[in-house]
Amino acid sequence: MYTVFLAGGIASGKSTVARELERLGATRIDLDQLSREVLAAGSPCLAEVTSAFGEELLDPVTGELNRSLLAGRVFGSKELLARLEQIELPHIRSLLRRRLHELAISAVPCAVVEVPLLDRAVSLLDLADEVLCVCCPHERRLAHAVGRGMDVEDFERRLGCQPSDEYLRSHADTIIENTGSLAKLLDRVRVWWYAHGNFVQTEGRDALGT
């Protein structure tokens, strides 16, 4: 199985690329979803988090994590955020390895791992065969975000918390440029897919009329 880590900033077109890869035959894994799973009620990771940041983070009835309270506690401090990531990442890595193994024995041809923040997933990169990054000019990204109803200030705030395109380019094996129409972006995704002929699916070929 070929494992791809897919990264890209807010409104860059990363989700569009991921959906097209899934349509072509890849299986998607959302790293954000894995991070939520490792913090499930009663999990070892949650026990470590509450030991480090306080038992009051737990709902007294359900035992679930109050994510808003945790976010308010750590995201104003680089030190506390680093501590949280130090706790979470080994658990995320272990879960990701299990999921990839399950997919591999199921004969899945390609797994695409969506990575929200590449700079915080460096310790996971050895699990990838390729790092694929979607890059898009700032003006286009802003237009995309505003078109989806996002406030300009909110967009800029979120953008400032993410790795820059320069960072993504320096850590990518392959870059997909989102600089034109949606059709051109999808064409670039297909070019990448068909260049990896070892996992191209017949259904995908037929869908494209090739």
Image: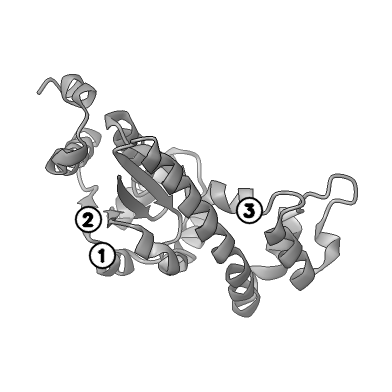
Q: Which residue is mark 1?
A: 169
Amino acid type, residue under disc 3 in the picture: Val
Q: Is residue 201 above or below residue 77?
A: above
Furthest toward the bottom, the residue is 79
Of the numbered discs 2 and 1, the one sitting upstream in the chain is 1
Q: Which is nearer the eye, 25 or 84?
A: 25
Amino acid type, residue under disc 2 in the picture: Ile
Q: Which is nearer the eye, 63 or 116?
A: 63
Question: Mark number for residue 38?
Answer: 3
Question: How busy is the neighbourhood of tag 1: few (under 14 within 10 Å), some, or many (20 plus)?
Answer: some
Kind of element beneath mark 2: strand
Name the residue located 26 percent from the left edge and 69 percent from the top edge: 170
Q: Is residue 191 left or right of residue 178?
A: left
Mark 3 vs 1: CB contact within 8 A: no
Q: Is residue 110 left or right of residue 188?
A: right
Q: Which is nearer the eye, 123 or 162?
A: 123
Task: Judge depth for marks 3 and 1 and give the one in front.
Answer: 3
Q: Is residue 210 above or below residue 179?
A: above
Name the residue located 17 percent from the left edge and 36 percent from the top edge: 187
Furthest toward the front, the residue is 105
